[in-house]
Image: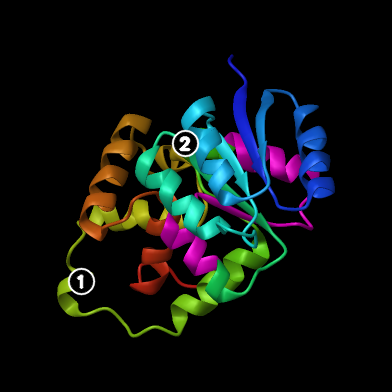
Amino acid sequence: MTDVRVVVADDQSAVREGLALLIEVLPGITVVGQAPDGGVATELVASEKPDVVLMDLAMPRCDGVTATRRIRDDHPETQVVVLSTYADEDSILRALDAGALGYLTKSATRDEIGRAIHAAAAGQAVLDPEVQRRLVSAALKLPAPSEAEADELTARERDVLRLLAAGQTNREIAKALFVSEATVKTHINRIYAKTGSRDRAQAIRYAYTNGYATA
């Protein structure tokens, strides 16, 4: 199996270099570049075509949210996992809205970071438990959906969205609903189209903000 190719973006050189050394010893991961800001990260994505960018948020010149949006717009085959000291609602929502597929705090262990990278490369969202809690908290503050929005998804699509919001993988959803993974992927693509979600993280947020999942 081909290694997951990763770019590490962080403005602090000691942190950036330490992260690169930390994750490169994990099986199935190769670091193909390091970036001191979001602009360089975007350039590296264009030249190196990594599978995943491990992205800090607070960086000079071009911050992580701006870089994430550019990368997801211009290079949708590359996923972004945020690794930040910030876990406030605004930072989380801005990063997920920009297209980040994973969000971890810097208290995450090496193995947790590795799992998030592999999950993102496979198109699966991984949110730190504290991040998930804050995301739900932010979602619950928003108004309830209108009746038209509630009827937008079919019954089976609502089932899939609830399981997706619970953090289950495509395989786990398929097993729970007694369908194939291909069928689950079809449902998820339809959910994306109907909800305006670009990826799994945005669909998870939609589930909580529109009443398809509860804390």
Please name the amino acid that badge 2 sits on: Thr
Task: Return the residue found at the far top.
Answer: 1
Does residue 109 show up?
yes
Q: How many marks?
A: 2
Q: Nearer the viewer, mark 1 or mark 2?
A: 2
> On the rendered structure, is 91 left or right of 110?
left
- The label on residue 78 is 2
> On the rendered structure, is 70 left or right of 47?
left
Q: Nearer the viewer, residue 46 or 101?
A: 46
* Image point (72%, 64%), residue name: 85
Residue 206 in the image, given as x and y percentages of width and height: 36, 65
Location of residue 35 with respect to 30 vertically, above or below: below
Please name the amino acid that badge 1 sits on: Glu
* Image point (49%, 41%), residue name: 79
Residue 25 in the image, given as x and y percentages of width and height: 80, 27
Residue 131 in the image, given as x and y percentages of width and height: 62, 65
* Image point (79%, 58%), residue name: 107
* Image point (33%, 35%), residue name: 179
Q: Nearer the viewer, residue 41 or 19?
A: 41
Q: Which residue is mark 1?
A: 149
Nearer-N-terminus badge (1/2) = 2
Task: Return the residue found at the far front.
Answer: 61
Task: Determine if the magenta segment contains residue 100.
Answer: yes
In the rendered image, which quarter contains the N terminus?
top right
Does residue 204 show up?
no
Q: Nearer the viewer, residue 157 or 103?
A: 103
The residues colored magenta run 92-118
Location of residue 154 with respect to 148 vertically, above or below: above
- The label on residue 9 is none
Q: Secondary structure at mark 1?
A: helix
